Structures are given as C-alpha cells and as structure tokens.
Image (spheres, rainbow, N blue to C red):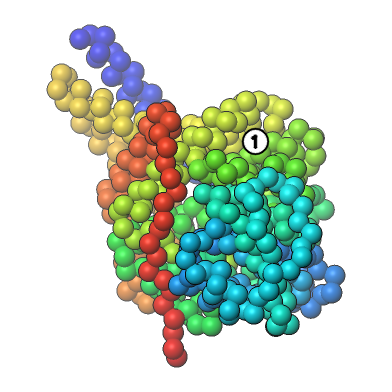
Amino acid sequence: MKTLENIIKNYEFFITCYSFLYIATYSVLAILSYLAIKKYYNSKYFLLKEVLVKSNHSLGVSIVAPAYNEEKTIVFNVKSLLSQEYPKFEVIIINDGSTDTTLEKLIREFSLVKVAFFYQEKIPTKTVRGHYKSTNPIYSKLLIVDKENGKSKADASNAGINSAKYSLFLCTDVDCVLRRDTITMLAKPFIENTVKVIATGAAIRISNSCEFKDGMLYKSYYPDNFFARFQELEYIRAFLFGRMAWSQTNCLLLVSGGLGMFDKETVIEAGGYWHKSLGEDMDLITRMRKLMHEKNQKFLITYIPESLCWTEVPSTMNVFLRQRVRWARGLVQTLYLHKKIFLNPKYGRTGLIVFPYFVFFEFAVPILELTGLIVLLLDYLFFEINYDFLLIVSAFVYLFYISITLISVFLDQLIYKHYSSIKEIIILVLMVFLEPFIYHPINVYAYLKGYSYFLRKKEQKWGTMIRQGFKNSEE
C-alpha cells in the first residue's frame, strides 16, 4: 500500500510539472500566433491580389476535388468551384467510382464528352477509366476524371494530381464552398517568398446553418446544432491560434485536407497521398518535410489567417465519433510510421520541435487524462484526497483553457466579424465555458478509442457522412 501511495504522489508531482509545461507551451504559441497574424496583415498589401487577378503571368493552379456519390449537390458544387476569380486555373473533379448518378449528372449538365488524354501515372492509383471535357467553351476549365473506387480520398486525389497540368494544385472536398479569391490568396505565398514554398493553407469555417447564394457565402450564422457549435469553437482555436503559431516558426505539420495548396513536384516526389492512411493530410506534410530535410533544401509551409472555405461538419454523435476516431488513428499512425524523425537533429525543427510537441501534447493528453481519473479514484478509495491540490490545479488548467479559447474568439470577431448578431456572440462565449465539461470528454473518449483500434489493428472504414446540404438564399 505504501508503494501505491508513493506512485500516486509521484504521479501528482508529474502532473503538476506537466500542467505548467503545457501552459507555458501554449503561452508561447499564443505569442507566436499574435506575431504571425500581425506580420500577415502588415505585409498583406505588399502584393495586391488585384495584381495577381489581372496578371497574365500568374502561376497556374489545378483545383483537385474527389467526388463519391455526390449526385444531390455535385452540379452546385462544381459551379461554385468554377467561379474562382483567377486568370489561370482548372477544376479537376475525380469521380471515384460513384454508384449513383454523379457522373451522369455531370455529363448532362456540363455537356461532357470522353476525350483522349495523355495520362501519366506518376503516383500509383486504381485504374482510371477515362477523362471528360466539355463541348461548351464556358466550361473549358473543367476536367472530369472517372476511375475505379479506391476506398479513400487519397487514391482519388492522387489521380487528380496525375491529371493536373499546372505546377500548383489546390486540394479540397467537392462539398466545400470556396471564397472567390481563394486561389489568389493561397497562391500569393508561392509568389512572394524567395525560399521555396511547398504548401500553404488557410482557415476553414463551418457551413452548418449558413446561407449560400450563387455558390458563395451569403449570410454567416453561428451553428444551431449541438455538435456543430462546439466544433465552431474548436476550428477557430485550431486555425487562428494553433496553426498560425506553427506557421510563424515554419513548423506546420498539418495542412487541412479540406483546403490546401501544394507544390505538385514536391508532392509527387514525396509519393503523393498514402491511401492506407487515416490521416492522409498530416502524413503527406510529414513526408514532404522529411523529403526536404533529407535533400537539405530550405522550404516554407505557410498559413494565412483568412477564412477561405466553408464545409459541413458532423451533426450527430455517431458520425462525429467516427470522424474523431479516424483522426486519432491517423495521428498515432503518422507518429509511429515516422518515429525516426522524433528528436532527430537531421530533421531540424520537424524532429526537435514539432514532432515532440505532437507526441507529448496532442497524442499524450487523452492518455494522461484517463490515467489521472484512475489515480483520482485510487486516491479516493485508499487514501485521503488532497482536495486543495486538486482544486488549484483543475481551476488553473480550466481558466487557462477558456482564456485561450476566448482570446481566439475575440481575435476572430475583431478580424472577420462573421457574426452580426450580438445574441450569436453571447451564445458562442457561453459555449466556451461549457466546452471542457461537455464536448472535451467526448473528444477524449473518441481519441482513446482510436488509439485502441490502432493497437488492435482493427479495420476501420471511412464511412459516409450524411450531409444536410447548404441553405440557398432566394433573396
């Protein structure tokens, strides 16, 4: 019993030190995020986007968007992607073996015909059955790739990359709605920087409850769905706070699969998206960073604090848990596959800063929270609980947690003013205080479940997210 008591006391000491380290790390990230946002807006007008839009020498960009059984919204989504205000781009829709009428609707709506296409399979994929182009000059920028189902977004994206004619490609989801200047804003870092930029990303917003008109955002509302409301907070914190901080130090390890622009040559050399990965976006960035370090070549991965994309998020418990379990498996899968990077000086900041962060904080936190509950239970059953210690540490962590989120919300509203209603802002702030008690435990459960699936090598399919679709304004 004495040994158990010593273990618990040592654990309490460890948790105290860990908590202070956690808070110190996020305090540094907060400062870095502020500096990154300030730097972005100070240099925003160095190269005006109007110059890029009117230039005949802009870098060409291929939009790559996989589609599987999207018959209900495919026409609306393609027209939205085609509405980009950029002089040199193409839209590549990959029909990933749809079993509904997705391809037929595309052929009928856009007057498509099968064409002879010089297709080089630089990244291996499932069989590509053909390419389609429109006979209507209005849709000359549209290319449809029809292929056998690869059972993953990665395989479909790779077929799109193989078919892309431009040196940059923007990877997105076919159900995403992009701001009309998305290509322009994401292409700017590739043009402005003297160091080679291999990827760039931007903030993604939640489309649940928003209204759209002519394929563009018409009115932005705070989601009315329980899960979507908490995810809105999570997205604001992750994109505006976390990823901007890592961008400031060139330590980004994740560019969202929903919106990211990449240097095609580097992606192909890195092997493209890995179809067996459940976190293909993080895995790709890791391999790209690894490749550049091994080539001893300087590079940048940047993020911009602009909301350029809207996407629907899970609105039910089952779909939400399935998504987060997959994310957790993708996280541990990537860390395990690339474990030789961890604390390896050969890989610079990737090995010495960002990889340890993901191991000690992103991966370890759910495990430590579970062990903390177990230790607390043992303390309660066999020893006298140090309530003062428990209260002080819990209050400190809680207050810090909500402070970071409130700062993110404040910056978001100050910069973008997405919510015009005071009522929506008040609800958003109230959800900040509830998140640690309601939403966070569900997330922890999902991540622990994902870890267990990885350890047991249990097969998990991607599954299908039942979407509610976009609200279209008739005004």
Residue 229: x and y in percent read 35, 62
Q: Quadrant of residue 315?
A: bottom left
Query: For the C terminus, which image quadrant?
Result: bottom left
Residue 219: x and y in percent read 45, 79
- Mark 1, residue position: 350
* Pointer 1 local density, CA inside 10 Å: few below 14, some 14–19, many at least 20: many
Residue 73: x and y in percent read 48, 72
Residue 411: x and y in percent read 49, 62
Q: Can residue 316 be seen from the camera position used here?
A: yes
Task: Please say if 76 is above or below 15.
Answer: below
Query: For the N terminus, which image quadrant?
Result: top left
- In this picture, residue 231 sits left or right of residue 73: left
Q: Quadrant of residue 86?
A: bottom right
Q: Can residue 243 be seen from the camera position used here?
A: no
Instruction: Look at the numbered disc 1 and give the secondary structure of its residue.
Output: helix
Task: Please say if 300 is above or below 223.
Answer: above
Q: What amino acid type should be assigned to the residue bearing mark 1?
A: Thr
Q: Residue at x 42, y 28 (%)?
A: 455
Q: Residue at x 42, y 37 (%)?
A: 459
Comparing 92 with 102, the one in front is: 102
Q: Residue at x 45, y 72 (%)?
A: 72
